[in-house]
Amino acid sequence: MKFYNPTASIFIPDGKTAEEAFKRTTHLGIGAHQDDLEIMAFPGIRQCYQDPDQWFGGVICTDGSGSNRTEKYTSYSDEEMTRIRKEEQQKAASLGKYSFVIQLDYPSAFVKTPHQQQLEEELLTLLAAVKPPVVYTHNPVDKHETHIGTVIAVIRAIRRLPLEERPGTIYGCEVWRDLDWMMDDDKIVLNVNDKENLWEKLIRIFHTQVKGGKRFDLAALGRRHAHATFFQPYETDEACQLMFAMDLSPLAADDSLDIMDYVMGHIQRFQQDVETKLKRHLGR
């Protein structure tokens, strides 16, 4: 498979051809950085793990060169961090038994640059080849601009596919900004009670992050436990770990929906709910 960047790569843990790996893939995660898939797309990884009929594939858009670095990684160059982070992602793909992982190797600054189309074109080619029924990507209200650049490229690429070839389910997932603020009727609730040991092993592969100044292993797990407890204030917990996602599927099904209007609609419904409750208690 040809890529725009000569340093981009595809890794298939069990040695199948790219065509075979694409054909069997049922769940595709498209993330900005190495370890984003393991944080945001674990429901898909978990569902496909060791299931011969379901396979998780991953795409990483950036090269990992802009990573935070402390302790042993303080003096590492961008080139060294890029090499190590790519190796970490491949190890995670092997452990999680992914169908494949592709690393497109774009600088983060490129991905978050508005109006560039190269990433969109590349994702279009990949989506057309894989034809995944389910896609996990970033949510469009994320705090990280590289994540915003990624999800916009994903949505635009999907919209260029023939309608019958578009994924039926698209999750906009949590990484840098939680989605607990969304109205309950709007949010997608993903139960991730089991396979915690698998997830902990996956996230700890990313030693450059966990030991390099960002304890994603503790933070992401804590968020999942918090979601489970704080989701329903008047009911006992039905799950011990939950993840929330924004449903982006309508944007793939209807090209007339404006991306901005669709996203802002979630924020407006939240604002209206807050205003209604405050006005009632303030007697206004």
Image (cartoon, rainbow, N blue to C red):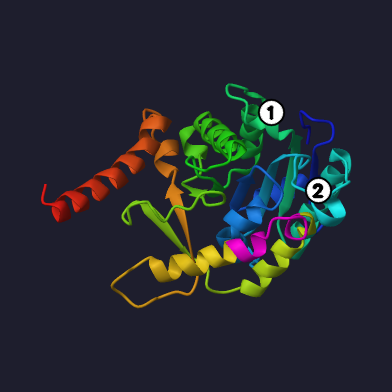
Residue 260 image-quadrant placement:
top left
Q: Where is residue 154 in the image (x, y as percent from the top left)?
A: 56, 36
**Residue drawn at (32%, 52%) of the image:** 183
Q: Where is residue 235 in the image (x, y as percent from the top left)?
A: 31, 75
Spot the residue most to the bottom.
236
Which of the two labelled residues, at mark 2 and mark 1, occupies the earlier sequence position?
Answer: 2
Q: Where is residue 3 in the image (x, y as percent from the top left)?
A: 77, 32
Residue 203 image-quadrant placement:
bottom right
Could you tell me if residue 13 is visible in this image? no
Marks 2 and 1: CB-CB under 8 Å?
A: no
Q: Is residue 22 magenta?
A: no
Q: Name the residue under label 2.
A: 86
**Residue drawn at (65%, 59%) of the image:** 216
**Residue drawn at (52%, 50%) of the image:** 173
Q: Gap between marks 2 and 1, in whole Å?
A: 18 Å
Could you tell me if residue 267 is visible in this image? yes
Question: Horizontally, is 224 left or right of 260 in the view?
Answer: right
**Residue drawn at (76%, 46%) of the image:** 18
Q: In which quarter of the image is the N terminus?
A: top right
Taking depth in this image into account, of 52 and 29 the one nearest to the observer is 29
Range of magenta residues: 209-219
Q: Name the residue under label 1.
A: 110
Q: Disc number at residue 92?
A: none
Q: Which amino acid does label 1 sit on?
A: Phe
Spot the residue most to the left.
283
Q: What residue type is labelled 2?
A: Lys
Note whether 49 is above or below 16 in the view shown: below
